[in-house]
Amino acid sequence: MDFTKPETVLNLQNIRDELIKMEDSIIFKFIERSHFSTCYGVYQIDNPHLTLGSDFHGSFLDWALMHLEITHSELRRFESPDQTPFFPDKLKRSILPSINYPKLLANYSNEVNYNDKIKRTYIDKMVPLISKIDKDDPNNYGSIASCDIECLQSLSRRIHFGKFVAEAKYQSNKPLYNTLIENKDVQGIMREITNSAVEAKILERLTTKAEVYGVDPTNSEGERRITPEYLVKIYKEFVIPITKEVEVEYLLRRLEDPN
Amino acid sequence: MDFTKPETVLNLQNIRDELIKMEDSIIFKFIERSHFSTCYGVYQIDNPHLTLGSDFHGSFLDWALMHLEITHSELRRFESPDQTPFFPDKLKRSILPSINYPKLLANYSNEVNYNDKIKRTYIDKMVPLISKIDKDDPNNYGSIASCDIECLQSLSRRIHFGKFVAEAKYQSNKPLYNTLIENKDVQGIMREITNSAVEAKILERLTTKAEVYGVDPTNSEGERRITPEYLVKIYKEFVIPITKEVEVEYLLRRLEDPN
């Protein structure tokens, strides 16, 4: 996807193709995470066994994610319209020259940030499904946080892609959406953005992908790293609903930006 | 693999199981890289279009890799015996408490570092195979460097795992290896560490994995992201030979550490 070309970015078919590619990335990253235990110590706020600095309050994951985001911000990561930071207040200036992206989304779009919810859902709901062993594992805090960051960044990109979906749908029928927005008709907007056939297809595709990617193809007797059940559950109960929340919030504010 | 338990780490079957898992990680990371163009600007030394700081000489990839390694070092990454830094002189102290790993490898093992060679081979030989489009792409320097770093770290871990292979083989037949080492018999050592049947099996497995993972299983008409040909070539011509170089260098120095 080329964010310098608005006509390609706001094309629903291109968006869907990109979402399909992201499914694979998310699955690959879940597989990497699946090799480790749940490891609650990584997520514990102010874990007493760690010294993260007296002015820092949060989990080890927060600490690692914040520091990686600072480095990534210097690599221009968060100037890209498909990237949403977990620690927007901590970012540094990029050392790469800025890209003058054309305007793709409404000017408040950076404020639509569901990363706190994504992180909470990931830790509380997804990790227990992905990981096969439920225990702490202090020797692997670094490796586990690295896997978690990869998973979170992929999930965040997938879910915030809802903004492009929302903008494309808005552009395709402004009068309809303007009325719904003026009436603050959340249910009406939700109905318009929901495409049950597309959602069913996503879950069907995930079932196949989990079956194929979930086990080493050269060792069919081997351990299953991911199962269709939990992958479908993660998308159905968390990824798709939070994506729709992003879409609804984005659309509800759409009249703030008349351009 | 639990590096606090030497008896599990230096078991050849466990090492091979770990190497098989790494194949999947490497393939997944190659697939992520395959979505981008070759992008020589990321690898160009002192790229005149970038301002990486007057005291820094290297490519954008070097800059990004160095800064990520600094952050990773604070997460204790390089205390783990299976991690080898690309910029060993730049690392910081970990903020996590140290793990007292038992001694697994000879005390000079950190000096056996093939990362410069791995990076050069990756840029010159592997990227042109993995990427389908040969052009620069300044809008994606950050994303591409991030993918490259993932690929390089996976390749580095895989290749330097040769040290565990070498140590396990040494432990299994000290008198034989001591004689070969005393005679500086590189060819003899190379002959002892080469298991052609195992190598053939690796390439066979990679062919199957590239066939399965290389294309979206829900869209068999879709683009092939990786092919068995190039994956086998990368392992046969680069990964396996450099791993053996690691093993030979490690073994040639083995008498420096009598314990």
Image (cartoon, coloured by chain):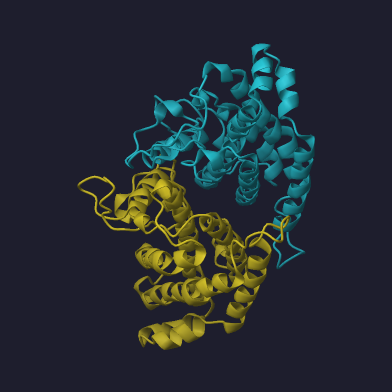
Chain colours: A yellow, B cyan
Q: Is residue A48 above or below residue A97?
A: below
Q: Position of residue A134 (x, y in %)?
A: 44, 62
In percent of the image, x 61 and y 33: which residue is there? B168
Viewer-nearest residue: A84 or A140: A140
Whether residue A104 appears in this view of the structure is: no
Q: In this view, does A236 lie above or below B59?
A: below
Please name the residue shown 53% across and 16% down the image.
Answer: B256
Residue A17, located in which quarter of the rendered image? Answer: bottom right
* Residue located farthest toward the left when viewing the structure as drawn: A54
Image: A168 above or below A71: below
Residue B46 coordinates in the image, percent (x, y): 50, 27
Residue A182 image point, x, y percent = 36, 85
Quarter of the picture containing the N terminus of chain A is bottom right
Q: Which residue is drawn at 61% across and 61% down?
A: A24
Number of marks in the image? 0
Height in image: B216 above or below A255? above
Q: Can residue A78 be seen in this view?
A: yes
Return the residue nearer the eye: B58 or B17. Answer: B17
Quarter of the image that includes the C terminus of chain A: bottom left
Question: Can you give x and y, in whole percent of width and height, for residue A252 in the image?
Answer: 38, 78
